[in-house]
């Protein structure tokens, strides 16, 4: 069995039908059916069972699909690594970022582009589950995220570069006159605020961290809205709806005239941040250098 046959098999598995797979592969159906029969004869197992007009993977077929996907990814990575030896630092750097970490990227991208102008960027935003899946499928090179990373599976597969911890701050509407001229507040003052919290259906770490800190100070926050978008929460705060607690770095993306940021005097909880990439897999030079730019920034105290 060769790589070509594995690609045939994976296409059939993906399409669930030989006819559609043949069309996708730009070949006739009979030759593709013969290739499938040859694979089954060579392995001595049935790879598919008929289900009406479609095909379903047998247990043996499902195992081969898993192994074939991994093998073809390794093969493609090997080709990219060999081709990349003479390419220099260029091409498209694909980055995934959780919404609360987007503010960490502009400065690093600006400085990186000054040094490597041939590199362009593709940025995907999403929660840990979405970005973890894209990283495993090699659709992105690395992830910037809050830690711990709430991976869907196999958290040990990631290499992680921790970045400087990010203190939490209170964010309130600029229109709240009681806090005009103030630069800080106490944690218990948050108990009186309508509270907005950043939370998705699957990633809840930051939400839980803030709620637990409130409980530690003797109160449950009055949560009136859970939202997966930082921008929407900021819009609601700007409209006077309520307040929130966010990592300080998030605020660099929003003008101070829209919302007001206050230090929290009696709480010192932090949000941990890091860059993640897959261990033991090819990482393009552009991605390695981008990670190194964060490492140097942390070392130099930027």
Image: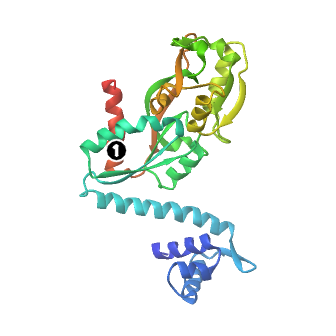
- Residue highlighted by disc 1: 288
Residue at screen point 64% across, 19% down: 213
Splitting the image into 4 quarters, where does residue 268 fall?
top right
Residue at screen point 34% across, 44% down: 288
Identify whether 273 is placed above or below 179.
Answer: below
User: In this orientation, which residue lies closer to the viewer: 169 or 36?
Assistant: 169
Q: Residue furthest right?
A: 52
Residue at screen point 60% across, 11% down: 186
Residue at screen point 57% across, 78% down: 21
User: In this orientation, which residue lies closer to the viewer: 87 or 171?
Assistant: 171
User: In this orientation, which residue lies closer to the viewer: 184 or 286?
Assistant: 184
Count of numbered circles on the image: 1
Splitting the image into 4 quarters, where does residue 269 fall?
top right
User: In this orientation, which residue lies closer to the viewer: 49 or 176?
Assistant: 176
Q: Position of residue 194 (x, y in %)?
A: 70, 24
Residue count near mark 1 (Cα–Cα under 10 Å), binned few <14, some 14–19, many ≥20: some
Identify whether 273 is placed above or below 171.
Answer: below
Q: Is residue 4 left or right of residue 204?
A: left
Q: Secondary structure at mark 1?
A: helix
Identify whether 66 is placed above or below 144.
Answer: below
Q: Quadrant of the C terminus?
A: top left
> Which colouring convention does the figure follow?
rainbow
Q: Position of residue 286 (x, y in %)?
A: 32, 48
Q: Position of residue 138 (x, y in %)?
A: 47, 55
Q: Position of residue 81 (x, y in %)?
A: 33, 57
């Amino acid at each position: 069995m060769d790589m070509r046959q594995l690609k045939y098999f994976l296409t059939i598995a993906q399409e669930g039908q030989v006819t559609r797979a043949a069309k996708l592969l730009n070949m006739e159906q009979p030759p593709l059916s013969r290739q499938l029969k040859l694979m089954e004869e060579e392995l001595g197992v049935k790879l598919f069972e008929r289900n009406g007009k479609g095909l379903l993977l047998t247990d043996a077929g499902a195992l081969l699909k898993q192994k074939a996907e991994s093998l073809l990814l390794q093969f493609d990575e090997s080709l990219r690594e060999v081709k990349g030896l003479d390419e220099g630092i260029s091409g498209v750097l694909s980055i995934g970022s959780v919404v609360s970490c987007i503010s960490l990227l502009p400065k690093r991208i600006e400085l990186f582009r000054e040094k490597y102008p041939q590199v362009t960027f593709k940025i995907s935003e999403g929660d840990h589950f979405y970005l973890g899946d894209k990283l495993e499928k090699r659709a992105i090179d690395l992830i910037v995220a809050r830690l711990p990373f709430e991976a869907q599976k196999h958290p040990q597969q990631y290499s992680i570069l921790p970045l400087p911890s990010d203190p939490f701050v209170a964010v309130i509407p600029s229109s709240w006159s009681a806090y005009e001229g103030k630069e800080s507040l106490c944690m218990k003052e948050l108990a009186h605020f309508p509270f907005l919290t950043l939370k998705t259906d699957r990633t809840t770490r930051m939400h839980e961290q803030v709620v637990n800190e409130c409980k530690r100070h003797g109160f449950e926050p009055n949560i009136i809205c859970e939202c997966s978008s930082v921008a929407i929460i900021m819009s609601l705060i700007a409209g006077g709806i309520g307040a929130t607690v966010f990592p300080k770095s998030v605020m660099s993306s929003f003008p101070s005239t829209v919302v007001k940021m206050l230090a929290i005097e009696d709480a010192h909880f932090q949000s941990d941040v890091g860059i993640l990439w897959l261990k033991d897999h090819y990482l393009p030079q552009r991605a390695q250098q981008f990670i190194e730019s964060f490492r140097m920034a942390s070392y130099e105290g930027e």
